[in-house]
């Protein structure tokens, strides 16, 4: 049975590796999902059949509870995928923290009863403390991130800052780590149990303190960093439980989350310390009140005429497209334009939306060809030659203020150069600022025309114009 478990662990690990590899390409992404699910199924069954597992009723009950929670969560709309992802991280962190706490107090109970089955070495105790700290801070941090993304009323959406905040945050973490070191050196001391509970409590508090000073503009990066933390907590749990499979699976999760975080930080011109500890405070408007220009509004008919006369069009999607569920109307417009010989491309910003790859997921759902999707660095050189840039619900990722407005939270973030196109059509529901909380200078430029309204409705009206109501190809 032990050999079967070892072989199953190798198979599961291989499936996890293939899952990550296949997820790199949209053409093989479905294979990646199947491989990941299959790997987890193999891992669960391989663990379940081990002879030391004797309480099968509890296992069945846990699996049933997982299905009861997981199935409804899998049916959330794509607009809610970012907060759904944050909740997954929260569950993973909570599981790691609870397993770590259970392992330690089980050992304490065995020790007091004189029936210790596993030696609590300094290394094992260190891994256990790391597991609890990482697990519980991931739990509360992810819940806070999900609440911000969901715009829960009692969770502030903007950064919450106060004097000495970084000192408090680092101090809480330092105390938790110091207590972890003390317990690792003296795991059986009379005070060790209380110290362990203090570690868990401080980790839970630190998770909240970690997220409240972070603004919405940085939330995609925060999600990927929390993913890395969840993976690292799984690695620590693997060392505690002596599970090679948990160590390798957690390492894959943690390293992929770390790499993604680095990519996102580069895309936003941020450092890890800037994102996690450099709270931006109250955002200032990008345009002073005295300099505010008028927003010029265009009709759907006029916008259709501009698109009809264009040789090339770049569509720039953002969170507004996700909220309106307008990706299918975007596809219909794409079809209408390409049928007329117009070259249409989609400019994808790495942090458009509320999580990494948010726009890619939505456009893939609408079966838009992947070849039409162009990354920011590749599309920007083409923007000055672009006849029409159609901005669909994007805001901060096309705001020219990012280039020079040092008092704004998006300063230094690379943007899609929509403002350099010959004509800009911007679909927007209202004049409210984006998630970063600042005005967008793109919308008051001389070459920008606004189309106010729900993105799905506006694009639907545009499609009708091309279908024959106002324009004939």
Image (spheres, helix red, strand yellow):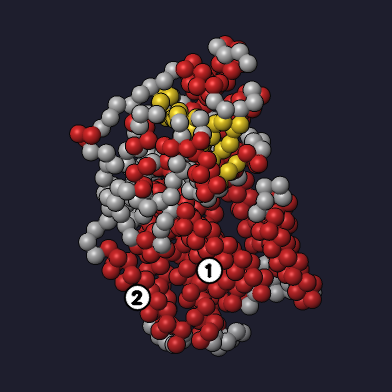
Q: Quadrant of the C terminus?
A: top right
- Quick check: 305 above or below 295? above
Q: Mark 2 vs mark 1: which is more N-terminal?
A: 2
Q: Secondary structure at mark 1?
A: helix
Residue 341 locus on image (x, y percent): 64, 26
Most distant residue in the top direction: 469
In the figure, is residue 4 to the left or right of 401?
Answer: right
Residue wearing tag 1: 233
Q: Residues within 10 Å of mark 2 (few under 14, many from 20)?
A: some
Q: Residues within 10 Å of mark 1 (few under 14, many from 20)?
A: many
Residue wearing tag 2: 175
At x 40% / y 48%, what residue is drawn? 217
Image quarter of residue 1: bottom right
At x 37% / y 35%, what residue is drawn? 442
At x 35% / y 32%, what residue is drawn? 445
In the figure, is residue 227 to the left or right of 439?
Answer: right
At x 49% / y 39%, what residue is drawn? 383
Give the CA separation, mark 2 to mark 1: 19 Å
Could you say which is closer to the camera, residue 182 or residue 428? 428
In the figure, is residue 260 to the left or right of 6?
Answer: left
- Quick check: 290 above or below 296? below
């Amino acid at each position: 049975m032990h050999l079967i478990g070892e072989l199953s662990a190798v198979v599961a690990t291989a499936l996890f590796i293939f899952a990550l590899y296949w997820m790199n390409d949209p053409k093989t992404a479905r294979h990646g999902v199947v491989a990941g699910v299959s790997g987890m199924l193999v891992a669960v069954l391989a663990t379940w059949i081990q002879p030391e597992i004797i309480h099968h009723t509890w296992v069945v009950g846990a699996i049933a509870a997982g299905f009861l929670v997981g199935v409804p969560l899998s049916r959330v709309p794509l607009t809610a995928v970012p907060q759904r992802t944050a909740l997954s991280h929260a569950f993973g962190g909570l599981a790691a923290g609870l397993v770590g706490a259970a392992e330690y107090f089980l050992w304490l109970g065995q020790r007091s009863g004189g029936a210790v089955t596993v030696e609590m070495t300094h290394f094992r105790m260190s891994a256990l403390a790391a597991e609890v700290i990482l697990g519980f801070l991931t739990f509360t941090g992810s819940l806070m991130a999900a609440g911000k993304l969901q715009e829960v009323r009692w969770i502030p959406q903007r950064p919450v800052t106060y004097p000495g905040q970084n000192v408090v945050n680092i101090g809480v973490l330092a105390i938790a780590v110091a207590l972890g070191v003390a317990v690792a050196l003296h795991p059986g001391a009379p005070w060790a149990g209380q110290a362990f509970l203090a570690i868990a409590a401080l980790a839970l508090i630190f998770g909240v303190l970690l997220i409240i000073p972070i603004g919405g503009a940085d939330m995609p990066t925060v999600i990927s960093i929390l993913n890395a933390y969840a993976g690292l907590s799984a690695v620590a749990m693997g060392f505690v439980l002596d599970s090679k499979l948990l160590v390798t699976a957690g390492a894959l999760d943690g390293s992929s989350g770390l790499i993604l975080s680095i990519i996102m930080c580069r895309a936003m011109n941020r450092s890890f310390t800037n994102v996690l500890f450099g709270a931006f405070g109250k955002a200032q408007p990008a345009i002073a009140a005295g300099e505010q220009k008028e927003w010029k509004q265009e009709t759907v008919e006029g916008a259709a005429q501009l698109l009809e006369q264009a040789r090339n069009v770049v569509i720039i999607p953002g969170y507004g497209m996700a909220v309106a569920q307008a990706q299918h109307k975007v596809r219909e417009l794409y079809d209408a334009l390409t049928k007329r010989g117009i070259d249409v491309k989609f400019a994808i910003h790495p942090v458009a939306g509320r999580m990494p790859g948010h726009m890619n997921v939505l456009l893939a759902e609408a079966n838009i060809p992947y070849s039409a999707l162009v990354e920011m660095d590749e599309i920007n050189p083409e923007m000055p030659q672009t006849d029409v840039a159609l901005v669909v619900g994007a805001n901060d990722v096309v705001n020219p203020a990012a280039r020079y407005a040092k008092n704004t939270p998006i300063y230094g973030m690379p943007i899609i150069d929509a403002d350099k196109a010959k004509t800009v059509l911007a679909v927007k529901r209202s004049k409210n600022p984006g998630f970063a909380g600042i005005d967008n200078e793109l919308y008051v430029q001389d070459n920008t025309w606004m189309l106010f309204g729900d993105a799905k409705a506006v694009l639907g009206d545009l499609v009708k114009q091309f279908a024959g109501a106002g324009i004939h190809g």
